[in-house]
């Protein structure tokens, strides 16, 4: 009677991670066949385990994970649009609209202050031209970059003790879900991160964003009014 064959290990990289044939349990095979994995007329029993690993996170995902941890540690709270309106009216909260200036001029909550956290790419260095080309490749002809003057502009308008609700179009979320275990980053959450990192202590975040604010029919004004 033939002895049980040794285990063979084989790992194959795939687009979703590593597919590991970690336990090819070859039973009743002579060792020459095992070593060469040649065909045999004898019965073969295979036990295959798939140990696919999760895809590695991108640098952007890792960066957002760190930002989210800071926001949670600093206890930045998300409020819905109606709560935000109440806080603005009754508790002297200021809505900080971090959308581009053109969007702000179109419509914004009354009394909101606009400081864009991202701006259109301004310079024409070789690096900036390359970035414009990269945006254009994806059909985006108004490429943006982080606004290096964001904090300076906020500090010129709001003191560190100001009560702030940061708002953008979509809002994003810090709440985990099955598809988004780290929530979803947004311009307003990134702006809130920069504020709490630089000494602002009363920072809230507009859940649902200004899209929801306008959809709910809450007060809004434009620069032409």
Image (cartoon, helix red, strand yellow):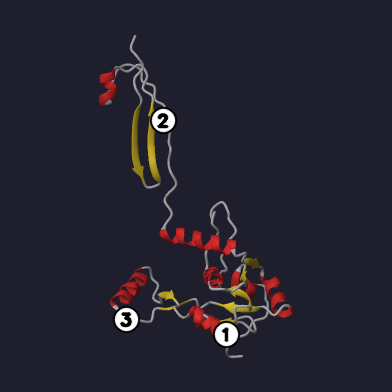
Mark 2 secondary-structure assignment:
loop
User: Observer-nearest residue: 96 or 75?
Assistant: 75
- Determine the residue positioned at 32% across, 18% down: 29
Question: How far separated are the C-alphas under marks 2 and 3?
Answer: 56 Å
Task: Determine whether, in the image, residue 202 is placed left or right of residue 152.
Answer: right
Residue 164, x across and y down, in percent: 62, 76
Task: Determine whether, in the image, residue 207 is placed left or right of residue 127.
Answer: right
Which corner quadrant of the image does residue 47 belong to? Answer: top left
Of the numbered discs 2 and 3, the one sitting upstream in the chain is 2
Q: Which mark is residue 224?
A: none
Mark 1 secondary-structure assignment:
helix
Mark 3 secondary-structure assignment:
loop
**Residue 90 in sight from this viewpoint:** yes
Classify mark 2: residues with Cα within 10 Å, few (<14), some (14-19) or many (20+). Answer: few
Question: How far separated are the C-alphas under marks 3 and 1?
Answer: 30 Å
Which residue is tagged 2? 48
Which residue is tagged 1? 157
User: Observer-nearest residue: 90 or 177?
Assistant: 90
Which residue is tagged 3? 124
User: Observer-nearest residue: 76 or 10?
Assistant: 76
User: Observer-nearest residue: 74 or 79?
Assistant: 74
Of the numbered discs 3 and 1, the one sitting upstream in the chain is 3
Q: Is residue 36 above or below residue 11?
A: above
User: In the rendered image, which quarter contains the C terminus?
Assistant: bottom right
Of the numbered discs 2 and 1, the one sitting upstream in the chain is 2
């Amino acid at each position: 009677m033939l002895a049980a064959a040794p285990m063979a290990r084989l790992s194959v990289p795939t687009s979703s991670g590593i597919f590991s044939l970690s336990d090819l349990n070859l039973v009743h095979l002579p060792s020459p066949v095992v070593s060469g994995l040649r065909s045999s007329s004898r019965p073969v029993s295979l036990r295959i385990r798939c140990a696919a690993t999760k895809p590695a996170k991108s640098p952007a995902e890792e960066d957002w994970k760190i930002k989210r941890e800071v926001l949670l540690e600093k206890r930045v709270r998300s409020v819905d649009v109606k709560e935000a309106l109440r806080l603005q009216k009754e508790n002297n909260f200021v809505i900080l609209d971090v959308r581009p200036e053109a969007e702000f001029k179109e419509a914004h909550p009354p009394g909101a202050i606009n400081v864009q956290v991202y701006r259109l790419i301004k310079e024409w260095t070789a690096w900036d031209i390359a970035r414009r080309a990269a945006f254009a490749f994806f059909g985006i002809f108004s490429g943006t970059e982080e606004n290096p003057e964001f904090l300076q502009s906020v500090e010129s308008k709001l003191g560190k003790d100001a009560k702030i609700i940061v708002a953008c179009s979509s809002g994003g979320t810090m709440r985990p879900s099955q598809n988004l275990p780290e929530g979803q980053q947004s311009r307003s959450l990134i702006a809130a991160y920069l504020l709490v990192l630089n000494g602002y202590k009363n920072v809230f975040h507009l859940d649902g964003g200004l899209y929801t604010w306008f959809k709910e029919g809450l007060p809004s004004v434009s620069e032409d009014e």
